[in-house]
Image (cartoon, rainbow, N blue to C red):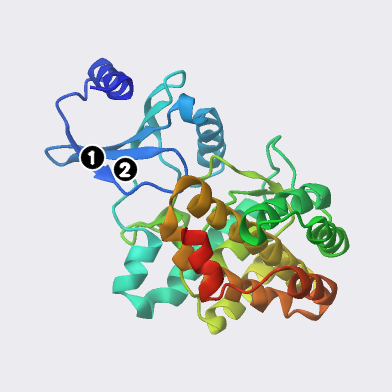
Amino acid sequence: MSDRSRAITAFLAQTGHDSWQQHPIAADASGRNYLRLSKAAQTLILMDAPPEAGEDVTPFVAIAGFLADAGLHPPAIVAQDRQAGLLLLTDLGRDSLAQWLDRHPAEALPLYRASTDVLAHLAKLSPPALTRLTPQVAGEMVAITGTHYAQRPLPDLVAAVTAAMAALAPRADRLALRDYHAENLIWRPDLDGLARVGLLDFQDAFVAPLGYDLASLLRDARRDVPEDICAAMIAHFMAATGAGADFPAQLACLGAQRNLRILGVFARLATAQGKTRYIAMIPRVWAQLQKDLAHPALADLRNVVADLLPPPDAALLARLRR
């Protein structure tokens, strides 16, 4: 038995859950692992976030508390050992929004509207003290795209993103959960209102310009959201938040910055960590990026991207697999 397995066994014994059955849940791109624990009709989720892998559960605990206090629905923390990187959480449900949509595609509009309602609620909150997505930070975050996707430093790309953010999305004043997309939302149709959407994977939350999470939801790296639903959700969000006429340009800028970074992150996962399954998502990320770069306000950034970044053709994807 490994040291990590012993730590988990000891934690479950201390909390009285060592007799519960354990069922692995698919891991995400991080170093965290998850188990669903079950006994009779009861279920809980164990988050295993090894400190030796650079994981820290403290931000998750803090943001979960903030969200719950704000009337939203993250998992409740049943037991914790922060030093060991172990959390025992309530089980929000088995169906992510993505899984539900795969079985019920005709329900996409109400599900995305419910998810957008959560974001409108978040937008009205005073954000906690977290890292801010300033234009400079936003630019620095895409340096990874040069390093791992283009495999050369691209300071001009960093500068172009910084300039676009300064012009179109300069104010970081709203809480953003950062990875707000269909696989990180639990759909709970038997509940009402905001409770229908359970929230996961928010430990990297930061303070960003209005609309960052909406860009994450609608320009999803893992699935295509129909353009009519995107347009309806943007209009719905603008009406709910009072966003001005310049909001679509801000949203396109945020979406472009986010997907530029994701190109680099997915390339790094493939080349540095051997997680080659993310390569299959890169063409979609590129396509989502092009949609946002088509906005007239992003002409300068569009030209820089066209000059510096190769499209993900078969040769580039093969290189990332090696």
Q: Which residue is mark 1?
A: 43
Mark 1: which secondary structure? strand
Task: Tell me residue 104's x, y (percent).
Answer: 31, 75
Q: Is residue 112 visible?
A: yes
10 Å crowding of disc 2: few (<14), some (14-19), many (20+):
some
Q: Kindly tell me whether residue 120 is visible in this rendering.
A: no
Pick whichever, 306 or 207, lies toward us. Answer: 306
**Residue occupying image coordinates x 46% and y 60%:** 321
Find the distance from the CA under tag 1 to the CA under tag 2: 6 Å
Q: Residue 207's x, y, as percent? A: 70, 45
- Return the x and y of residue 230 as percentages of the image width and height: 57, 76
Residue at 80% x, 73% y: name it: 298
In the image, 103 versus 53, the foreground residue is 53
The residue lying at 37 percent from left, 32 percent from top is 48
Residue 25 is tagged as none
Q: Is residue 164 left or right of residue 107?
A: right
Query: Where is mark 2, residue-wise?
Result: 91
Mark 1 or mark 2: name the one nearer the start of the chain.
1
Instruction: Identify residue type, mark 1.
Output: Thr
Q: Is residue 219 left or right of residue 18?
A: right
Where is residue 223? Give x, y as percent. 46, 70
Looking at the image, which residue is at 45% across and 62% down? 182
Packing grade of label 1 (10 A; few <14, some 14-19, many >=20) is some
The image quarter containing residue 9 is: top left
Assess whether mark 2 and mark 1 are in contact (beta carbons under 8 angstroms): yes
Give residue 75's quadrant in the image.
Answer: top left
Disc 2 marks a residue whose amino acid type is Asp
Q: Is residue 293 left or right of residue 120?
A: right
Determine the image quadrant of residue 96. bottom left
Which element is circle 2 on?
loop
